[in-house]
Image (cartoon, rainbow, N blue to C red):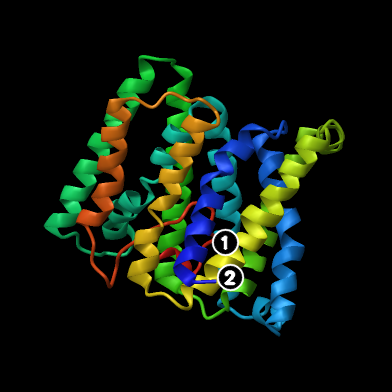
């Protein structure tokens, strides 16, 4: 399959996550935990297929930042799944996609990097877009604000992951890094899941819910990651970064077409400002595009 076609399929798959999350009647914490657990054997299959020695990488010092980012990924998933419960898929996704802007804000503070005038402009534009979305949502329902804030928190977690990767880097192959991160996501969420009556929630799922949950773990996570990684090896970083904009676009389309969510003119303008702001700050050597659902690692930053 052509790599560009393949990555478009991946963006369609990831764009539908909000629809799946809405239709699986378990708590956001259990949903994130289940996603990681179900995806682990799929990722492990590809590790074995590619003849990688997983546990030799776990012993390396370079695995520590990967393990930390894995914990943050688990929390980011929980925040995003909670956001889907409070607000529309479009609002949650657009708030989440503020992540590159958070990176621009935090990088000077944590990594002593300097912002260019273009990057400062992109921050201002992105926040103007977020204000438009928040203002519109408040007129509809106050609970929307909580959802938008949770989406923004999810984006903030991913911003921290990007900064960790930029600071420490990783020499671990992508599939192995993904396995470690999924494992650590499950580890950090396991104590929280114990308070969620997991057996009762799982057993209450009907066939539809079970199938949706399995698809979320197997297709949206395990298989989609592998398709993304194989495409990444054959395409330039800039090309992958530009195609990543299809993720939030498909998320909005699915939210409107399948869930019947409202999406007005102010939200369209706000979304365009947020997504366009990262293009304004474009520099090939340090463009930051964080793709919804990708674990931390060299694939998060272009």
Outermost residue, left side: 117
Q: Are marks 1 and 2 in contact (CB under 8 Å)?
A: yes
Q: Which residue is mark 1?
A: 68
Label 2: element kind:
helix
Name which quarter of the figure residue 17 lies in.
top right
**Residue 104, x across and y down, in percent:** 28, 55
**Residue 192, x across and y down, in percent:** 71, 41
Q: Residue at x 44, y 15 (%)?
A: 141
Q: Residues within 10 Å of mark 1 (few under 14, many from 20)?
A: some
User: Left or right: 235 with respect to 297?
Assistant: left
Outermost residue, front side: 1
User: Left or right: 299 with respect to 219?
Assistant: left
One can see residue 216 in this view: yes
Q: How much space separates mark 1 and mark 2, taking CA atoms? A: 6 Å
User: Left or right: 302 with respect to 189?
Assistant: left
Q: Which residue is mark 2?
A: 64
Label 1: element kind:
helix
One can see residue 36 in this view: no
User: Left or right: 203 with respect to 20?
Assistant: right
Image quadrant containing the C terminus: bottom left
**Residue 161, x across and y down, in percent:** 47, 59
Q: Residues within 10 Å of mark 2 (few under 14, many from 20)?
A: some
Q: Residue at x 30, y 33 (%)?
A: 268
Image quadrant containing the N terminus: bottom right
């Amino acid at each position: 399959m052509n790599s560009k076609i393949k990555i478009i399929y991946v963006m369609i798959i990831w764009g539908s996550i909000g629809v799946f999350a809405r239709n699986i009647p378990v708590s956001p914490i259990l949903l994130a935990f289940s996603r990681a657990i179900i995806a682990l054997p799929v990722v492990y299959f590809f590790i074995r297929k590619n003849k990688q020695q997983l546990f030799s990488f776990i012993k390396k010092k370079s695995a520590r930042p990967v393990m930390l980012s894995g914990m943050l990924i688990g929390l980011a998933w929980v925040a995003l799944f909670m956001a889907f419960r409070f607000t529309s898929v479009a609002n949650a996704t657009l708030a989440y996609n503020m992540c590159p802007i958070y990176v621009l804000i935090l990088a000077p503070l944590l990594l002593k990097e300097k912002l260019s005038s273009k990057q400062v402009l992109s921050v201002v534009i992105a926040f103007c877009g977020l204000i438009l979305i928040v203002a519109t949502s408040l007129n509809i329902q106050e609970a929307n604000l909580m959802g938008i804030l949770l989406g923004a928190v999810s984006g903030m977690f991913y911003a921290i992951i990007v900064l960790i990767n930029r600071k420490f880097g990783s020499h671990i192959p992508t599939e192995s890094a993904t396995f470690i991160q999924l494992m650590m996501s499950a580890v950090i969420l396991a104590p929280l899941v114990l308070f969620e009556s997991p057996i009762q929630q799982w057993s209450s799922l009907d066939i539809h819910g079970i199938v949706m949950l399995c698809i979320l773990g197997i297709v949206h996570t395990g298989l989609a990651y592998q398709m993304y990684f194989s495409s990444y090896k054959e395409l330039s970083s800039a090309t992958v970064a530009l195609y990543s904009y299809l993720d939030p676009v498909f998320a909005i389309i699915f939210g409107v077409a399948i869930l019947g969510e409202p999406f007005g003119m102010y939200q369209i303008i706000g979304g365009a400002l947020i997504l366009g702001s990262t293009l304004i700050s474009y520099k090939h050597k340090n463009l930051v595009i964080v793709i919804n659902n990708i674990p931390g690692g060299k694939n998060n930053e272009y």
